[in-house]
Image: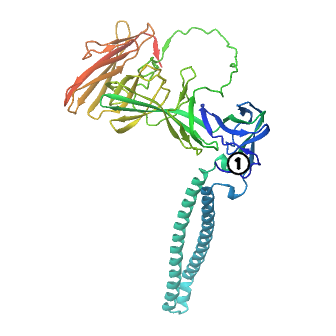
Amino acid sequence: MTTNTLMPAGLTLDAPVKQVTLLEDRAQVKRSGTLTLEPGQHTVLVPDVAPVLQDLSLRAEASGGARVVDARVRRALKVTRDERPEVARALEKDIEQLTDTVKALSEDQALTQQRRQRLEEILGRGFSELPEDISWGLTAPQWEESLEGLFGKVRALRERGLSLEHQLRDANETRARLVFQRQAFDRPDTRFTAWLEADVLVTGKASVEVSFEYTVPNALWRPMHSARLADGALFFESRACVWQNTGEAWTNARLVFSTARASLGIEPPLLSDDLLTAQKKQDKLVVQAREVVIQKAKAGPGGGGGSAPVPSTVELPGVDDGGEIRNLEAKGPCTVPSDGRPTMVPLFDFKATPKPKYLAFPELELRVFLTSLQKNESRFPILAGPVELLLQNGFVGWTKVLFVAAGEAFQLSFGPDDSLRIARAEREKEQESHVDKWKTMTQSVWLYLSNVGDEKKTVEVRERMPVSELEQVKVELGAKRSSPKPDVDDHGFLTWTLELLPHSQQQVKFAYDVSTAPGVQGM
């Protein structure tokens, strides 16, 4: 333990961090240590604690027949450079030297540019006076010698100015890089030092264990997972990504990750009046086509990661616990430095037997994606978060998974298959019946699938057609114009299951009719 020279004299207690409970936006730290005390009241000091800890959250207790009368936190501002970390002091020294270098180079560059501009003005005046001197009979060699000397000086100044510009640019880049490195050391403990003080009352000589608990900001965690599909099995690992910049390092501490949200308020929402008014019924019926997201429980697009294409970016969502507070513990003691950088902490892992499937959504993407359906074989839930995808031993991309309870099935997409190709074409035709004046719009779609690989693969293709909620609008699938015949659900999704032999092609065609009654206007 480092010695704090700003701390007052007293009994120093070696109380390292034993346990840290990380919440969504803060952490609860527990320290404890043991020392032998004589009868009476003693002031126990714990150095090098987080300067950002919340004073009101500090709690202290003692065992072994002792009692904590009072507990408090003290802070002191580090003023001199010698009190800062050695690496930070070295960086500050280099930054100061580079700042002086940049200043000298800037002054030299400005002086060089000023001299060059003066010589260029002299050359300009000389060229303007050249015709007049020739008329007075001055010889050309005199002008030649003068001009060559001036041109030589201007060229030399231009070369020096260019060299200074390159040196100044390199010095500024180096200085900016050092400043960025120095900012990484701007932790709370580099500006402040903090220690705990506890007044412990002991009735008799005994070995006393004193523990402290407090809450600190600048600490958070988010779930992050990894899934590897290899040799007919899925290896899933759930991890916690931890960031903390509290000013104290958590060394070999027990980490507990909680989904409790202590920062959420409990105030009810504000209510406002709803004004009801009468409105005249319209004579014409106006219909509107809209996109509706179909939510599904468990596996599928609505839960467990879905089967959509792999997103290009990864976003860290808030901690989703499915409505119930969860506490997940790390596999073993962990060390998390106070540097604001992410630290991966393993939580749990499991091996599952997946059901691989090739899925295609030609309307959205002309690719065939490899997906896997499996169960959460762990006794812990999988929290919502990004998932790193690996095939065999190679990285293929990222996806995300929603909350998956223990024993629940979820789906992952491992990206497109290069051996499967797909193309799509469509045609639209509109006509009106001369008898009942109904308008019919016919949509025809052709899908062309190819397997350029050496293995037979089964592909599930999904398309969609509109679904009507009105009697004046009818949507019908042209069964005779669809080959092969698809399976249609209540939401208008069409599904084909096709077997593609090696180096083979297959065509899918379907059509549907959207009929509207007279007087119906679309938007």
Q: Amino acid at mark 1?
A: Phe
371 relative to 438, above or below: below
SS at circle 1 = strand
- Is 501 left, or right, of 241 in this rendering? left
Q: In the rendering, at what x and y percent does residue 2 appear? A: 65, 50
Give left or right: position of 205 versus 31.
right
Q: Residues within 10 Å of mark 1 (few under 14, many from 20)?
A: some
Q: Which residue is mark 1?
A: 192
Q: Residue at x 46, y 22 (%)?
A: 379
Residue closest to the eye, 451 or 483: 451
Question: On the rendered structure, is 513 left or right of 325?
Answer: left
| Residue 353 point in image, percent of width and height | 34, 24
Comparing 275 with 279, the one in front is 275
Q: Above or below — where is 190 with respect to 23? A: below
Q: Residue furthest front?
A: 205
The percent position of residue 38, horizontal first and vertical second, equals 76, 39
Residue occupying the point 53% across, 85% down? 131
Number of marks: 1
Q: Quadrant of residue 361?
A: top left
